[in-house]
Amino acid sequence: MTVPAKAPWPSLRLGVNIDHVATIRNARGGGHPSPLRAARIAAQAGADGITAHLREDRRHISDDDIMALGREIELPLNLEMAATEEMLGIALRHKPHAACIVPEKRRELTTEGGLDVAGGGGRLGDFTRRLVGAGIRVSLFIDPDPIQIEAAAAMGVPVVELHTGAYCDAGHGRGEAELARIRTGAALAAEAGLECHAGHGLSFDTVGAIAAIRQIEELNIGHFLMGEAIFSGLDSAIKRMRALMDKARAELSGQMSA
Ligand code: PXP
């Protein structure tokens, strides 16, 4: 079994979401633990990018965090944000490498479900065009739903991020159906010329199946890594996640070249 020198599918990047370092910091105020320090450790541990969600209510990441990350971190910054005029102004000022547009409800615990791109009308299209026009790589966070994927392609954004929450939360016996939706969605996205990312709720147990979907080019992972870091350290948690992603990709190489 030989692995081709250059795999005929994209490599898989890991974006480490550091929101919950800020959640812990904000529980007491002050500066500890520092999201910037976490981003530096993530870079050393093998992350390909840093992701941070500046929420309207600033419950974790702050405006100062975004400024510090943009100034001090060499890895590409992926700014998760709602489609509001305030966030548009911030993104245009900081010009992160990427902006992932997410739906946001004030009372939700986390991002529940993807954007309704198909029902979003022209407003979302105008919004994303202004970001793309500023040289920011825009992605839309959507459920793995063919209607939403087609709407994203029609809008002309370069990237979609498929919501893996339903797969990760699936009870016994429902996981395969949710995984099949993500596989189909990733294939559809790639056919439509979209770069495909995925994330939400991924853990050591669920990452392998998602990493084995060859059209997916980037995973964004936060909550599980930060929780695991309490027990094993952030460096070790990220390295293990990276290793599981690489193992799934290597197995894919084996299957393709066998
Ligand atoms: N991708 C997007 C668009 C998200 O909103 C989030 C959560 O902030 C994640 C990925 C990461 O999800 P988790 O923290 O569950 O790993």
Image: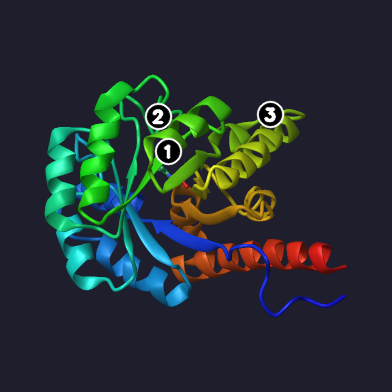
Q: Name the residue under label 2.
A: 115
Ligand 1 found in image quarter: top left
Upstream in sequence: badge 1 or badge 3: 1
Identify which amino acid the numbered label 3 is placed on: Gly
Residue 45: percent from the left, percent from the top? 46, 74
Q: Name the residue under label 1.
A: 141
Identify which amino acid the numbered label 2 is placed on: Leu
Residue 75 is tagged as none
Q: Is residue 120 above or below residue 240?
A: above
Identify which amino acid the numbered label 1 is placed on: Phe
Q: Distance between the residues labelled 2 and 3?
A: 24 Å
145 or 68: nearer the eye? 145
Place residue 73 in its image quadrant: bottom left
| Residue 92 showing in the rendered view | yes
| Residue 106 showing in the rendered view | no
Residue 232: percent from the left, percent from the top? 52, 65
Q: In this view, does 87 lie above or below 10?
A: above
Indicate left or right for 8 with 201 as reference. Answer: right
Place residue 17 in its image quadrant: bottom left
231 or 119: nearer the eye? 119
Indicate left or right for 145 with 93 as reference. Answer: right
211 or 126: nearer the eye? 126
* Label 3 neighbour load within 10 Å: few <14, some 14-19, many 20+: few
Q: SS for tag 1?
A: strand
CB under 8 Å between discs 2 and 1 = yes
The quarter of the rendered structure image containing the N terminus is: bottom right
Q: Mark 3 points at which residue?
A: 171
Q: In this view, does 123 lie above or below 190?
A: above
Residue at 66% in and 50% down: 205
* Label 2 neighbour load within 10 Å: few <14, some 14-19, many 20+: many
Indicate left or right for 105 with 139 as reference. Answer: left
Q: How far apart are marks 1 and 3 (CA)?
A: 23 Å
